[in-house]
């Protein structure tokens, strides 16, 4: 490890990182929108939960067309979320509690209200101002057709025309013009932005659309609709191009020039696990989100296959895997796994599976409460620019504010309402209610995270599969050099299975019946055993 004391320099290899969607976590000033003071006031909750680091989604100056993923000033805090002083206070308090802080960086595109884009629109075609973005003449007799057939991730053409007739590229919303990463000025600017936040003490960056900055030479047509699966087999001319890796190598050198403990996490939708592993080669980023795991159905064989493949591919480049079940872009996994009681049972079992796997785990705010996707938000509240695509209701349903306490919405989120309404039924899911119930999902997460910290076998290290009946995943985690270990068994099937009791029960996601040296593991249930000699 470059720099840093050996003991601490690898903290990220098995860290549990809690994702805070700032807008929806906690509202400190009563305007109905989550903010930095709100987070600061909930640090005792987060350190009590037992996570190692917090990842904060963008809180930078923004017109909020994509809720902060459209940045107008990369070096300041949007007044909606607080101030730079609030941020440094938050970093200080978090560090005092041993919590690391990871912030988002959005290098693929700026806001259309960024001073650079405003200057580009005002300037002539071919001007240095336009060179910072991707401006092109259109096709057709009068340039009235977009320069190529690329489609925006949010639907519709990836090009918008400006008054003088040129078009600019936006892989996301028209309010998010793509930057031109062929320009040395862009490289220099982002290195300076990274330094700005590193100097304020952040422990790392989550790099938005880390697979998107570089586009194929000549911007060739895709040739078919690109509104296909993000994790398909095709490499699109605007994603996962070789050139992005050079950028990540430069950023890694910059991170390492601090103290060897600052990390970069790629938000990269690479088509295959092999291609994803390229982002975490030794001289590139530390972690990449494992969206292949996230998109896997609740099925033992499918889960085992993705786990094996992830461990193998990340392992082949010496990187830790990550495990992600939910984030602010996807339907919450309680709902993906079937919703209702079934979805919650599966999500609880998935939590024990995920937290027993080697590598780093991400927890999206509210998953520790077993929150479902809110599917029936009234139309007038929906704001997500992605809404509408494929009859999608958009991503607002996984961004509903957290229920903290009390009997009525917004359940302690803040003193003055909430930007999205919380369902009345979340009365039973508040942090306050669940803290009083030993069987709650919150208490399950607290216990699992405590055990994960206490059991060295659950740290960085290998996994050994054990035989189990169809529909199950059974594996051992052993401390390097033998000794005590943990066995995790998950029954993802729909009927109970009979298993040997591998040791003393540490934790179970639901009721488990034991008889003698065997246990009956009900459907959609997981258990952790402590094994004296690694068995
Ligand atoms: O997401 C990148 C991305 O590709 C997602 O849009 C994803 O494919 C989609 O939401 C799946 O439904 C990042 C951010 O996480 C997202 O919130 C932003 O909207 C996007 O970048 C643009 O910055
Ligand atoms: Ca607020």
Image (cartoon, helix red, strand yellow):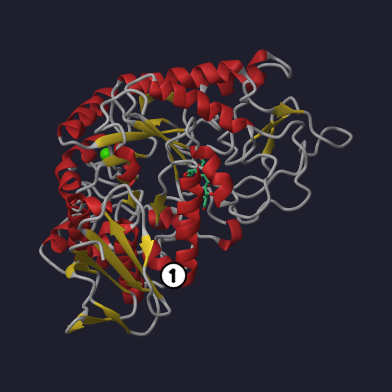
Q: Quadrant of the N terminus?
A: top left
**Residue 39 vs residue 187: left or right?**
left
Around disc 1, counting alpha carbons within 10 Å, would you say few (fewer than 14), some (14 to 19), or many (20 or more)? some
Residue 247's image quarter? top right
Q: Is 447 located above or below residue 510 in the figure?
A: above
Q: Residue furthest front?
A: 481
Query: Which residue is labeled 1 in the image?
Result: 298
The answer to whether residue 113 is visible is no
**Residue 524 vs residue 237: left or right?**
left
Residue 503's image quarter? bottom left
Residue sitting nearer the eye, 164 or 91: 91
Q: Which structural element holds mark 1?
A: loop
Kindly identify the residue that appears in the image at 73 percent across and 19 percent down.
125
The answer to whether residue 475 is visible is yes
Where is residue 110? Give x, y as percent.
53, 29
Kindly identify the residue that appears in the image at 49 percent across and 30 percent down.
283
Q: Residue furthest right?
A: 141
Kindly identify the residue that appears in the image at 57 percent across and 48 percent down.
274
Q: Residue furthest left?
A: 436
């Amino acid at each position: 490890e470059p720099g840093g004391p050996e003991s601490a320099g690898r903290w990220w290899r098995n860290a549990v990182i809690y994702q805070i969607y700032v807008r929806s976590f906690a509202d400190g000033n009563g305007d109905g929108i989550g903010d930095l003071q709100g987070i600061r006031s909930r640090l005792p909750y987060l350190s009590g939960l037992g996570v190692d680091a917090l990842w904060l989604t963008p809180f930078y100056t923004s017109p909020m067309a994509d809720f902060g993923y459209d940045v107008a000033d990369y070096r300041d805090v949007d007044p909606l979320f607080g101030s730079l002083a609030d941020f440094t206070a938050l970093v200080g308090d978090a560090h005092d509690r041993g919590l690391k802080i990871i912030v988002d960086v959005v290098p693929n595109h700026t806001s259309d209200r960024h001073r650079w884009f405003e200057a580009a629109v005002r300037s002539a075609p071919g001007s240095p101002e336009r060179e910072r973005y991707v401006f092109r003449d259109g096709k057709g007799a009068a340039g009235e057709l977009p320069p190529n057939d690329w489609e925006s991730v949010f639907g519709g053409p990836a090009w918008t025309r400006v008054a003088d007739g040129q078009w600019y590229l936006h892989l996301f919303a028209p309010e998010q013009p793509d930057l031109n990463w062929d320009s040395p000025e862009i490289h220099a600017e982002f290195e300076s932005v990274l330094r700005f936040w590193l100097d304020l003490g952040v422990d790392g960056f989550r790099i938005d659309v880390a697979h998107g900055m570089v586009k194929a030479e000549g911007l060739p047509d895709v040739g078919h609709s690109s509104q296909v699966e993000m994790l398909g087999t095709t490499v699109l001319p605007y994603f996962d191009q070789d050139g992005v890796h050079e950028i990540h190598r430069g950023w890694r050198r910059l991170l390492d020039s601090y103290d060897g403990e600052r990390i970069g996490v790629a938000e990269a939708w690479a088509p295959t696990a092999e291609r994803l592993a390229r982002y975490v080669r030794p001289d590139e980023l530390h972690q990449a989100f494992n969206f292949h795991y996230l998109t896997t159905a609740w099925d033992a064989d499918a889960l085992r296959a993705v786990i094996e493949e992830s461990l193998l591919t990340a392992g082949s480049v010496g990187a830790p895997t990550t495990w992600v079940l939910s984030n602010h872009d996807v339907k919450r996994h309680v709902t993906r796994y079937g919703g209702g009681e079934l979805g919650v049972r599966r999500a609880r079992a998935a939590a024990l599976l995920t937290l027993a796997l080697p590598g780093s785990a991400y927890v999206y705010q509210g998953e520790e409460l077993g929150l479902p996707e809110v599917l029936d938000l009234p139309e007038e509240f929906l704001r997500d620019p992605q809404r509408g695509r494929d009859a999608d209701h958009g991503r607002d349903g996984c961004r509903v504010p957290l229920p903290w306490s009390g009997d009525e919405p917004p359940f302690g989120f803040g003193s003055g309402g909430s930007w999205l309404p919380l369902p009345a039924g979340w009365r039973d899911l508040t942090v306050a209610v669940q803290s009083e119930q030993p069987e709650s999902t919150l208490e399950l997460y607290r216990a699992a995270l405590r055990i994960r910290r206490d059991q060295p076998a659950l740290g960085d290290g290998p996994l050994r599969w054990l035989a189990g009946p169809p529909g199950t995943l059974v594996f051992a985690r052993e401390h390097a050099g033998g000794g005590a270990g943990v066995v995790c068994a998950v029954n993802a099937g729909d009927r109970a299975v009979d298993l040997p009791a591998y040791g003393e029960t540490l934790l179970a996601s639901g009721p488990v019946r034991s008889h003698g040296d065997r246990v009956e593991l009900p459907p959609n249930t997981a258990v952790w055993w402590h094994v004296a000699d690694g068995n």
